[in-house]
Image (cartoon, rainbow, N blue to C red):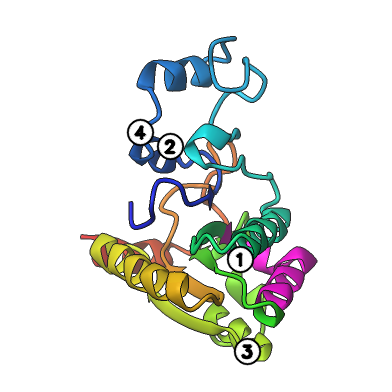
């Protein structure tokens, strides 16, 4: 909602909110969910693993890293066409351990691409805790090595996320450059229904339950 409707978004898994705020017809969205021909991809992907150029949403790539390079491409096209547009791409903390993440940040930094890289840091990449994924204190620190403006915010604070994206998007349109935004949050359920949460220490749930409430 903080971006213009003709600015591209590359969302995460099953991110229904991205599709609904873009005003997609709900009947076609339901058809997509059910894998019907009249959905957006003629029943191929089902779920929300699809994109629609009409509404400026690029379908997510399952392991998340590669879609950051695509965001760079969209940002470069916008820059060359002098469109003054921002592209937002989402990844998880696990995706930041992939080579695609580092390549995308480096290219965006060198070419001053108008891309907002949003990391949803929920403390576990699938079942791997963040302390086994990287050595730096925070994921926002990874932007320093590339000379990228980076910051960390409370990912559960909807207004803080909205205000941050909106403020930086307006600035980036006038002064093209990338931004690395780490949103700290937590997953109160398993990565998906089958995995459960036995690998997560109970004290983490207690801590985040207090924050959420």
Kindly indicate whether the residue at mark 1 contacts the one at mark 4 (C-beta within 8 angstroms).
no
Alpha carbon distance from label 2 to label 3: 32 Å
Please tell me the numbered disc located at residue 79.
Answer: 1
Q: Nearer the viewer, mark 4 or mark 1?
A: 1
Separation (CA) of disc 4 from disc 2: 7 Å
Label 3, residues with CA under 10 Å away: few <14, some 14-19, many ≥20: few
Q: Can residue 154 be seen in this snapshot?
A: no
State the CA–CA distance, disc 4 to disc 3.
36 Å
**Marks 1 and 2 close (CB-CB < 8 Å):** no
94 inside magenta stretch: yes
Q: Is 62 left or right of 174, judged from the image as shown?
A: right
x, y percent for residue 78: 59, 59
Query: At numbered mark 3, what does the secondary structure look like: helix, strand or loop?
Result: loop
Q: Quadrant of residue 155?
A: bottom left
On screen, 198 above or below 205?
above
Q: Position of residue 202 (x, y in %)?
A: 43, 62
User: Which is more foreground, mark 1 or mark 2?
Assistant: 1
Question: Which quarter of the rendered picture does the C terminus lie within?
Answer: bottom left
Q: Which mark is residue 23?
A: 4
Assign a secondary structure to mark 1.
Answer: helix
- Above or below — where is 28 with respect to 91? above
The residue at 61%/66% (across/down) is 79
Q: Which residue is mark 3?
A: 147
Q: Which residues are magenta?
A: 91-108
Name the mark on residue 183. Answer: none
Residue 33 x/y as whole percent: 50, 21
1 or 2: tag closer to the N-terminus = 2
Image quadrant of residue 139? bottom right
**Image depth: mark 4 or mark 2 in front:** 4
Q: Earlier in the sequence, mark 2 or mark 3?
A: 2
- Circle 4/circle 3 CB separation < 8 Å: no
Q: What is the residue that sits farthest to the left in this orientation?
A: 213
């Amino acid at each position: 909602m903080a971006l213009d409707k003709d600015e591209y978004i590359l969302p995460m898994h099953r991110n229904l909110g991205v599709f609904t705020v873009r005003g997609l017809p709900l009947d076609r969205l339901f058809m997509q969910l059910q894998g019907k021909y009249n959905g957006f991809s003629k029943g191929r992907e089902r779920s929300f693993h699809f994109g629609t150029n009409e509404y400026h949403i690029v379908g997510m790539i399952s392991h998340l890293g590669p879609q950051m390079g695509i965001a760079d491409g969209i940002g470069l096209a916008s820059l060359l066409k002098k469109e003054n547009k921002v592209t937002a791409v989402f990844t998880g903390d696990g995706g930041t351990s992939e080579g695609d993440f580092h390549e995308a940040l480096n290219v965006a930094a060198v070419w001053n691409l108008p891309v907002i890289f949003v990391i949803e840091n929920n403390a576990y990449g699938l079942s791997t805790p963040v302390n086994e994924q990287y050595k730096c204190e925070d994921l926002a620190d990874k932007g320093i090595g590339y000379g990228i403006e980076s910051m960390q915010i409370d990912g559960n604070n909807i207004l803080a996320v909205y205000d941050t994206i909106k403020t930086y998007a307006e600035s980036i349109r006038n002064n093209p450059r990338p931004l690395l935004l780490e949103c700290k949050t937590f997953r109160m359920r398993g990565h998906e229904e089958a995995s459960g949460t036995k690998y997560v220490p109970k004290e983490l749930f207690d801590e985040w339950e207090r924050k959420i409430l």
